[in-house]
Image: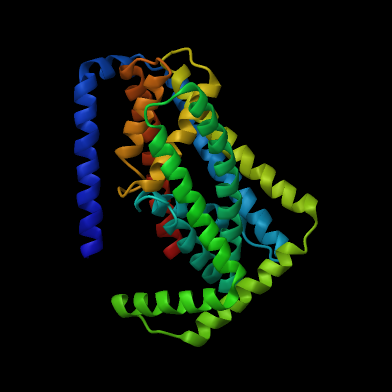
Amino acid sequence: MKRNIKSLILFVGSIVFILVVFAYIGIGEIFKVLVSADLRYVILAIILQIVVSILLTIRWKYIIKILGSDVSSKNIFLLVLMGLFINNITPSMKGGGEVVRAYYLSKLEGIPKGLAFSTVFVERVLDTSIFLFFTLIVIGYFIIAGFKYLEYLILSWIFLFTLTAIVIYLIANKRLLIKTVIKISKLICKCGAYKYDEEKILKSIEEFYSSMKFFKNKKSLEVFIAIILSVVWYVVDILKLWLLFLSLPYAVSIISVATVYLITLLSGVLSITPSGFGMADTVMILSFSAFKIPPSVAAAVTLLDGFVSYIIPTFLGYIAMIFIKK
């Protein structure tokens, strides 16, 4: 209950903050830009958002298949949507959706929990590695060209890299991982009044390591396909944001859009608000302004992106969660 109240306060606070930013830019100016939007491009962006969900479904199903299990595409698609919903209502790193997806994958498909968690772990490693590589290029560019908020971006990149390195280090050290998981599990069970079952936890960890060994033994081509699917969904997500610019219309290079997209995602790393709401939107507006894009246009695109990338997935994800729980 306290956690829900805290999230609600942060969410309301972030709305107030972004409204202040919009008021500073000029709500009337933003509204004029929004009214001029071409709905055909907005609809195409919504379609691409659905395509992103489908790509995530294909990739997850492919990774599960690599690990030796065949699952229902319908269930995977619903779980992906539910994961997006969970990520959109949890702060910062958006990791809650992965845990929930793995848990329900195990329950729905009868897959061992360790294997289910290993699939989402592989996904997260792929996504984070590609993201860190792309954003490092962007940071390198801004070190040369100059950017007002460069220190913030570097700090976010270091934080994400360090966190990823810690997780990989834990995975590489089985004993340390077991100790860490047991301590966290005891704390969760104590706070949430759940029954603590150490035997079940140790069994899941063993299943996790078994599936990871199985993944390591796979051919490089299969791993390469998983990487390609990860890159493709990033590209489609960037194209979606670019289409929203075309809807206004406003001429902007797709390279600029891709740069701002990566900066915005990186800014969400240190955000404490649900899905980085408020902070990420402000960073997006400031970043677009750095590319000489009028603040009213940047704010309008940010609002459209919030509708396409946040509100619609959250709504569909909530419906998917109802179906999953039934």
Q: Residue shown at 34%/46% (left/top)?
A: 271
Q: Which of 188 and 38 is in front in this view?
A: 188
Report the number of discs: 0
Q: Residue shown at 51%/80% (left/top)?
A: 201
Identify whether 168 is placed above or below 133.
Answer: below
Colouring of the image = rainbow
Q: Which of 261 and 145 is in front in this view?
A: 145
Q: Nearer the viewer, residue 92 or 246?
A: 92
Identify whether 220 is placed above or below 25.
Answer: below
Q: Please tell me in which quadrant of the rendered image residue 213 appears.
A: bottom right
Quadrant assignment for the C terminus: bottom left
Left or right: 305 in relation to 223: left
Q: Position of residue 24 (x, y in %)?
A: 20, 23
The answer to whether residue 269 is visible is yes
Q: Please tell me in which quadrant of the rendered image residue 23 appears.
A: top left
Identify whether 221 is placed above or below 201.
Answer: above
Identify whether 293 is placed above or below 133.
Answer: above
The answer to whether residue 79 is visible is no
Q: Position of residue 245 (x, y in %)?
A: 45, 20
Left or right: 214 in relation to 86: right
Quadrant assignment for the N terminus: bottom left
Residue found at the far front of this picture:
144
Q: Residue shown at 42%/44% (left/top)?
A: 156
Q: Where is residue 286 in the image (x, y as percent from the top left)?
A: 35, 26
Q: Where is residue 230 in the image (x, y as percent from the top left)?
A: 62, 44
